[in-house]
Image (spheres, helix red, strand yellow):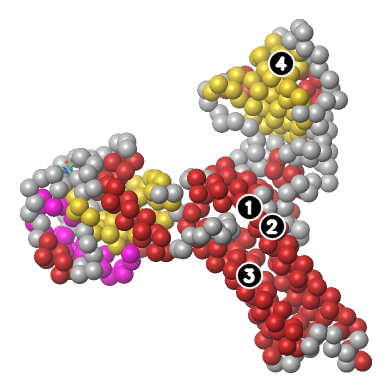
């Protein structure tokens, strides 16, 4: 499907930068470029060339005035990102030149691209399947190197290849089942029941393996939520700031400084960890305290890990016990942190040991930065407990996981049907539905609406 429209967009972030790129894709891309580009004196442009770059100027065709000095890249279909003719204009990365060049392209007949439309065209024109298109988004949004590696694997087609091979096997079985339906009257059984069962088991196992890999990739992709909880003034906001290496949250000696929850993501040993600073839990003295505490409790409910913080320089108080009780009730993975170890210590460690017999506190000084290495190691260890990373890891997003799960359900129903002597027609039906779900995953069969929803998550120009 080669689209009629020629699309254009600014493909680099808006702001001041060394260069900015305006990208065009479609039949008219070269025609428009020819009208607006004037090569520098000794340059001769071969408009039939592909993957060539030319130095020159963009001229406004209406006024003949130069707009910016640029490098023009010409890429001829079909060996391009979208499989259409693509032109990229590298201009200076200021908002005005970029906007002006975009405006001229629009005036000359291009249309403003929708979010993700370049990648959507790559998919619709068959260069990549849907799971690869989605991995482009993962690459753009990757928060850590590990996520990037996983997304690159997907873009190179690793998930697609697995799906393709499972699909092939299902088609093989389906064709045998259909032959058996055709010969139903002769009661010919091409594949004995035991064999069918073996095939189904094998397919279910393969899907389960893929789904297992999804568990790991989810943590790598989305990371985990770590909530810092403790009574007021123990140094929760100070820890957030130290981990971020900037003054994100207000810190003060006045108890109750933080009222709202503050979230920031950092990279801990390759995992994106969303650190959430909360209002201190304690005895509410006014409605604001109460609202803050409510938000803290909500964050705690969503937490994957709780960083339970105590102040080493003060003895345990009633408020501490209240926090302990709240955290214990949640039965979540918890790290016990004792802060302010740079000051004389008053905290009763024996009592702490009684309350949390299985936790070894990590001692830190949030303001001086000591103990942070160990804290990060402990957080990473808790994450590793949740997953078992291997070189086999694959990135599978929620949508893809859903499709895999639906296929697996069809295969399980088919197997149960086999055990209960249901007709071959029934098995064929389940098999066909299972294949359809795999096709949804790769985008072989998917409604326009779902497609639009997927690509709308991309940025404009991608
Ligand atoms: N000496 C020392 N002081 C610290 C340390 N961490 C925090 N403080 C101080 O303790 C006070 C409270 O710190 P915050 O980070 O605002 O504490 P908080 O837990 O966020 O407090 P609330 O937002 O009120 O719940 C500030 O004066 C900090 O400078 C530390 O490791 N050592
Ligand atoms: Mg605070």
Any atom of ligand 1 within 8 Å of the CB at mark 4?
no
Q: Which residue is mark 1?
A: 154
At 91% across and 83% down in the image, what residue appears? Answer: 182
Which residue in the protein does label 4 denote?
Answer: 55
Q: Residue at x 33, y 64 (%)?
A: 333
Q: Give the residue pinned by disc 2.
A: 160
Which residue, given by chain and number where applicable, does mark 3 sit on? 207
Among numbered discs 4 and 2, the one appearing first in the sequence: 4
Q: CA distance from mark 4 to mark 2?
A: 39 Å
Earlier residue among tags 2 and 1 = 1
Cα–Cα gap, marks 4 and 1: 36 Å
Q: Residue 178: horizontal and vertical position, in percent? A: 85, 79
User: Could you say which quadrant of the image residue 19 lies in?
Assistant: top right
Q: CA distance from mark 4 to mark 3?
A: 52 Å
| Badge 4 or badge 3: first in the primary sequence | 4
Residue under the image location 60 percent in, 65 percent down = 210
The disc, 1 or 3, on the residue closer to the chain's N-terminal end is: 1
Q: CA distance from mark 1 to mark 3?
A: 16 Å
Q: Are marks 2 and 1 in contact (CB under 8 Å)?
A: yes
For mark 1, does the 10 Å Cα neighbourhood hold few (<14), some (14 to 19), or many (20 or more) residues?
many
**Element on which disc 1 rests:** helix
Disc with the residue nearer the chain's start (2 vs 3):
2
Which quadrant: the C terminus?
top right
Find numbered disc 2 in the image and state the secondary structure of the residue it sits on: helix
- In this view, the residue in front, 289 or 86, is 86
The answer to whether the residue bearing label 3 lies less than 8 angstroms from the nearest atom of ligand 2 is no
In the rendered structure, find residue 451 and report the number of the disc placed on it.
Answer: none
Q: Is residue 108 visible?
A: no
* Magenta span: 309-333
| Residue 404 x, y percent position in the rendering | 64, 67
């Amino acid at each position: 499907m080669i689209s009629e429209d020629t699309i254009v967009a600014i493909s680099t972030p808006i702001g001041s930068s060394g260069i900015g790129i305006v990208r065009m894709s479609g039949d008219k891309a070269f025609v428009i470029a020819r009208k607006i580009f004037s090569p520098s004196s000794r340059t001769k442009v071969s408009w039939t060339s592909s993957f060539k770059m030319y130095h020159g100027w963009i001229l406004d065709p209406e006024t003949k005035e130069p707009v910016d000095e640029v490098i023009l890249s010409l890429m001829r279909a079909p060996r391009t990102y979208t499989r259409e003719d693509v032109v990229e204009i590298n201009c200076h990365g200021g908002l005005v030149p970029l906007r002006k060049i975009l405006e001229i392209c629009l005036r000359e007949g291009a249309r403003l691209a929708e979010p993700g439309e370049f990648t959507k065209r790559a998919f619709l024109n068959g260069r990549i399947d849907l799971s690869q298109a989605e991995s482009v988004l993962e690459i753009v949004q990757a928060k850590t190197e590990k996520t990037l590696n996983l997304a690159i694997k997907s873009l190179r087609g690793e998930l697609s290849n697995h799906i393709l091979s499972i699909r092939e096997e299902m088609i093989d079985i389906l064709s045998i089942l259909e032959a058996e339906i055709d010969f139903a009257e002769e009661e010919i059984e091409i594949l004995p029941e035991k064999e069918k069962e073996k095939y189904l088991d094998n397919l279910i196992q393969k899907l389960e393996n893929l789904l297992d890999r999804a568990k790991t990739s989810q943590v790598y992709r989305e990371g985990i939520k770590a909530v810092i909880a403790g009574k007021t003034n123990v140094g929760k906001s100070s820890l957030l700031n130290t981990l971020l290496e900037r003054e994100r949250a207000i810190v003060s000696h006045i108890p109750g400084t933080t009222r709202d929850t503050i979230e920031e993501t950092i990279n801990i040993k390759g995992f994106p960890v969303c650190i959430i600073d909360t209002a201190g839990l304690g005895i509410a003295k006014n409605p604001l305290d109460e609202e803050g505490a409510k938000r803290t409790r909500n964050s705690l409910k969503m937490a994957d890990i709780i960083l339970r913080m105590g102040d080493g320089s003060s003895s345990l108080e009633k408020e501490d016990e209240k926090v302990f009780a709240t955290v214990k009730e949640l039965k979540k993975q918890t790290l016990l942190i004792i802060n302010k170890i740079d000051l004389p210590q008053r905290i009763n460690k024996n009592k702490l040991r009684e309350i949390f017999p299985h936790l070894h506190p990590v001692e830190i000084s949030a303001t001086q930065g000591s103990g942070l290495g160990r804290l990060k190691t402990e957080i990473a260890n808790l994450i590793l407990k949740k997953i078992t990373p291997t070189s086999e890891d694959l990135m599978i997003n929620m949508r893809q996981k859903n499709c895999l799960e639906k296929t697996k359900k069809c295969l399980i129903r088919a197997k149960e049907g086999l055990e209960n002597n249901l007709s071959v027609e029934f098995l064929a039906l389940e098999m066909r539905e299972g294949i359809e779900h795999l096709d949804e995953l790769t985008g072989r069969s998917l409604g326009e609406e779902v497609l639009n929803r997927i690509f709308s998550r991309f940025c404009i120009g991608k």
